Amino acid sequence: MKIRVATLEDIPTLVELGQQFILEAPNYSGRVINIDVLTENFKEIINGSGCIFIAELGSFAIGGIVCSSTKDWFDGQTVAFEQVFYVKPEYRVTNAAINLLSVFIEWAELIKADRVQVGTTTGIQTKGCLRLYKKFGFREHGIVLDMELGND
């Protein structure tokens, strides 16, 4: 298995992973993917607003993590965060998630982030995801709630 930085040529693969992710996620499965919005987000990240890492077995993409950063609203610290972190179900028994999270943290250090924040809002193996994050030293703070307003 290898982890590599995604390029613009990877966008179709990333879109496919994104579609599979949304279909699997109980919290997201009822929402419709806008491929144009998804593609534009990936282009912006790849072109410099962040970084996307892909986990591959051979030439087959088995997962990825979309990394970004922002300034914290009250102290100006740089916070690195993952927009989406997904490994295909049949590869969750591999080191793909561990390797992707490791390169995300390395990327955060490279951009000189002050903090790294992760979370899980999907409903996909929430307890396992929390165990993974805690294994890396992340501490749990707060709860995220979600409410659909139905505005079209």
Image (tube, grey):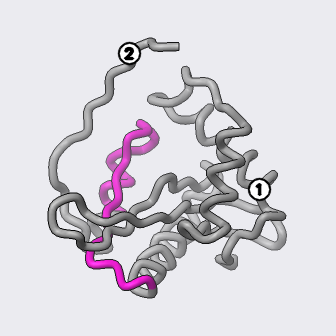
Q: Is residue 144 above or below residue 110?
A: above
Question: Residue at coordinates 81% horizontally, 51% vertically from top-left?
Answer: 12
Nearer the observer, 122 or 90: 122
Tell me the quarter of the image containing the N terminus. Answer: bottom right
Identity, as a three-letter code, of the amino acid under mark 2: Leu
Give how far across and how far down residue 44 sits, in percent. 63, 59
Q: From the viewer's perspective, is 34 left or right of 112?
A: right
Q: From the viewer's perspective, is 9 left or right of 135?
A: right
Q: Which residue is mark 2?
A: 149
Question: Residue at coordinates 38% horizontally, 15% vertically from top-left?
Answer: 149
Quarter assignment of residue 109? bottom left
Question: How busy is the neighbourhood of tag 2: few (under 14 within 10 Å), some, or many (20 plus)?
Answer: few
Identity, as a three-letter code, of the amino acid under mark 1: Ile
Give how far across and how far down residue 113 sits, in percent. 34, 78
Question: How busy is the neighbourhood of tag 1: few (under 14 within 10 Å), some, or many (20 plus)?
Answer: some
For residue 122: magenta?
yes
Q: Which residue is mark 1?
A: 11
Q: Element under label 1?
A: helix
Give how far across and how far down residue 77 sits, in percent. 24, 73
How many numbered circles does the render carry?
Answer: 2
Kindly indicate whether the residue at mark 1 contacts the one at mark 2 (C-beta within 8 angstroms): no
Nearer the observer, 27 or 148: 148
Question: Residue at coordinates 19% horizontally, 63% vertically from top-left?
Answer: 139
In 3D space, how far apart are the residues under numbered discs 2 and 1 (Cα atoms)?
30 Å
What segment carries the magenta color?
111-132
Question: Residue at coordinates 72% horizontally, 37% vertically from top-left?
Answer: 35
Tag shown at residue 121: none
Q: From the viewer's perspective, is 111 left or right of 146?
A: right
Give how far across and how far down residue 27 sits, in percent. 45, 29
Q: Element under label 2?
A: loop
